[in-house]
Image (tube, rainbow, N blue to C red):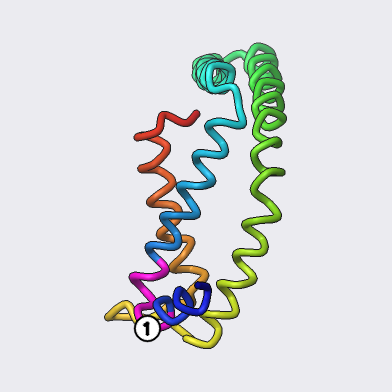
């Protein structure tokens, strides 16, 4: 099965990498959504945004701005702690996946994008960022 996928990825490198990027990003987004409490994540994001906006408004009073920034940093740390679980769940499978992907695309070389060529890694990163933004909106992942 992996050999068939490998042949597809080397024969159609841009299409294959786009498809692989979508699948991996979808898996990561779903893991993140279901491994975290989305209500808590949403409220933390809203609190951080509110504190940041208040800190911007309080730029004339450095003491208040520092206090608001400190609260925002504390909320940010809490947010990061909640994000740690899905990261631990996906780290090993995605790491192994990237080792396999590197073996395939190091053989294929650069991916030609018309005016210029990029390594497989940068093409993957670009696809991943685009898919991540779209999937997080569609799946309502916070």
Residue 60 occupies which quadrant of the picture?
A: top right
Query: In the shown orientation, is residue 119 left or right of residue 19?
Result: right
Residue 93 occupies which quadrant of the picture?
A: bottom right
Q: Nearer the viewer, residue 59 or 88?
A: 88
**64 shown above or below 84:** above
Residue at x-position 52% and y-position 70%: 121
Residue at x-position 43% and y-position 82%: 7
Q: How many marks?
A: 1
| Residue 76: in magenta span | no
Residue at x-position 53% and y-position 17%: 39
What residue does disc 1 label? 11
What range is drawn magenta here? 10-17
Q: Nearer the viewer, residue 104 or 62?
A: 104
- Residue 74 in the image, given as x and y percentages of width and height: 71, 21
- Residue 13 in the image, given as x and y percentages of width and height: 39, 77
The kind of secondary structure the magenta stretch mainly shows is: helix
Residue at x-position 65% and y-position 34%: 83
Query: In the shown orientation, is residue 53 left or right of residue 67?
Result: left
Q: Residue furthest left?
A: 114
């Amino acid at each position: 099965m992996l050999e068939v996928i490998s042949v597809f990825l080397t024969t159609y490198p841009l299409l294959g990498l786009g498809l692989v990027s979508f699948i991996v990003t979808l898996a990561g987004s779903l893991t993140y959504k279901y491994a975290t409490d989305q209500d808590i994540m949403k409220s933390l994001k809203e609190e951080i945004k509110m504190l940041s906006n208040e800190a911007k408004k309080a730029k004339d009073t450095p003491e208040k701005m520092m206090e608001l920034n400190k609260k925002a940093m504390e909320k940010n740390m809490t947010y990061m702690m909640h994000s740690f679980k899905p990261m631990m769940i996906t780290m090993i499978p995605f790491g192994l996946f990237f080792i396999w992907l590197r073996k395939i695309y190091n053989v294929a070389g650069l991916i030609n994008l018309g005016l210029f060529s990029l390594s497989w890694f940068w093409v993957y990163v670009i696809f991943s960022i685009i898919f991540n933004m779209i999937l997080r909106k569609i799946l309502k992942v916070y």
